[in-house]
Amino acid sequence: MANIAITGAGRGIGFELARQYVETGDTVYALCRDPAKADGLQKMASDHQNLKIVEMDVGSDASVKAAVSGISPASIDVLYNVAGIIGPYEAELESSDWDAWDEVLNILLKAPLRVLQAVLPLMPSGSKVMTLTSQLGASTWPYGGLYAYSAAKAGLNRLMRSVSIDLKDRGVVVGLIHPGYVQTDMGGPGAEITPAESASGIRSITANWSIDDTGEFLKWNGGKHAW
Ligand SMILES: NC(=O)c1ccc[n+]([C@@H]2O[C@H](COP(=O)([O-])OP(=O)(O)OC[C@H]3O[C@@H](n4cnc5c(N)ncnc54)[C@H](OP(=O)(O)O)[C@@H]3O)[C@@H](O)[C@H]2O)c1
């Protein structure tokens, strides 16, 4: 059985990943910003001792370090960077809310590296860090708007490609996953797939991801995503 750490596990795709791994018997460290408000996780934890709920605000260095020191000395086999926010939506051709940009860049771009830095000492050769990115981060995606989100995800893709090169000798696998257009608070009810379908696909491609594929950008259902 594996040890799985998931950021943003209180709701959405992160919650569904936690639920599915818990059901298969793996030990899940469900990292969430406010455990008291994570009703679904609390209910699951009452029935499953293999679910550990850990407070972590991925936007805060202190919170990330405190959370990881709390789960030490367990090793982590898979780290999922899932936590995310959407930020400003419309085209910003005249003005921008720069504080909102800073928040998006902190949560979507800096936080996955911040969390990885904290967890890496617990990650042996063969472990995996899987980061949820988006098709909006691909230069080929033909839509405007969502400037901060798209820019952050594009930067995240490039960042994790670099990280994959620097971790290859240590045997730590790095993956970038577009989770699909998913019916969560972020994707909305009109999105194309359910969180269960997305999480199931993500788990499947993660299980098959080897060091030979490190740094790749895949879709939730297995195909390569254009950069
Ligand atoms: N849904 C889609 O269609 C879609 C498509 C492409 C990519 N993605 C990506 O997939 C990931 C998950 O998206 P989702 O649809 O599940 O989103 P969601 O339903 O809106 O959930 C977002 C999650 O991120 C957490 N989060 C936000 N800020 C945080 C912080 N500072 N510290 C810790 N956790 C924080 C939230 O926790 P709180 O409850 O505390 O706010 C929540 O658990 C994101 O990275 C997103 O960009 C989603």
Image: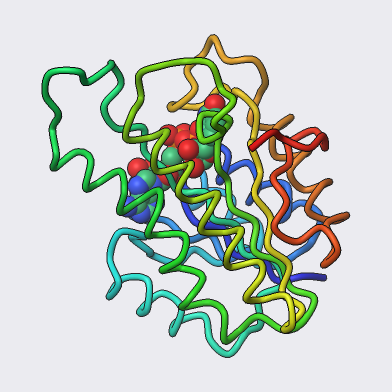
Query: What color scheme is it?
Result: rainbow
**Picture layout, residue 169 above or below residue 183:** below
- x and y percentages locating residue 221 in the rendered image: 80, 33
Is 59 placed left or right of 173 in the picture? left
**Picture layout, residue 62 above or below residue 195:** below
**Picture layout, residue 226 above or below residue 115:** above
Judging depth in this view, the residue of 213 and 67 nearest the camera is 213
Is 114 placed left or right of 201 in the picture? left
* Residue positioned most to the top: 190
Is residue 19 in sight in this rendering? yes
**Which residue is drawn at the image coordinates 49% and 56% (left, top)?**
7
Tell me the quarter of the picture where residue 104 sits. Answer: top left
Please identify the quadrant where the C terminus is shown. Answer: top right
**Which residue is drawn at the image coordinates 28% and 17% (left, top)?**
91
Q: How many marks?
A: 0
**Which residue is drawn at the image coordinates 65% and 66% (left, top)?**
164
Is residue 36 in sight in this rendering? no
Ligand 1, by image quadrant, is top left
Judging depth in this view, the residue of 144 and 61 nearest the camera is 144
Please identify the quadrant where the N terminus is shown. Answer: bottom right
- x and y percentages locating residue 33 in the rendered image: 35, 55
Tell me the quarter of the picture where residue 106 sits. Answer: bottom left
- x and y percentages locating residue 99 in the rendered image: 13, 42
Is 48 placed left or right of 92 in the picture? right
Judging depth in this view, the residue of 79 and 163 nearest the camera is 163
- x and y percentages locating residue 11 in the rendered image: 48, 40
**Which residue is drawn at the image coordinates 76% and 64% (left, top)?**
26
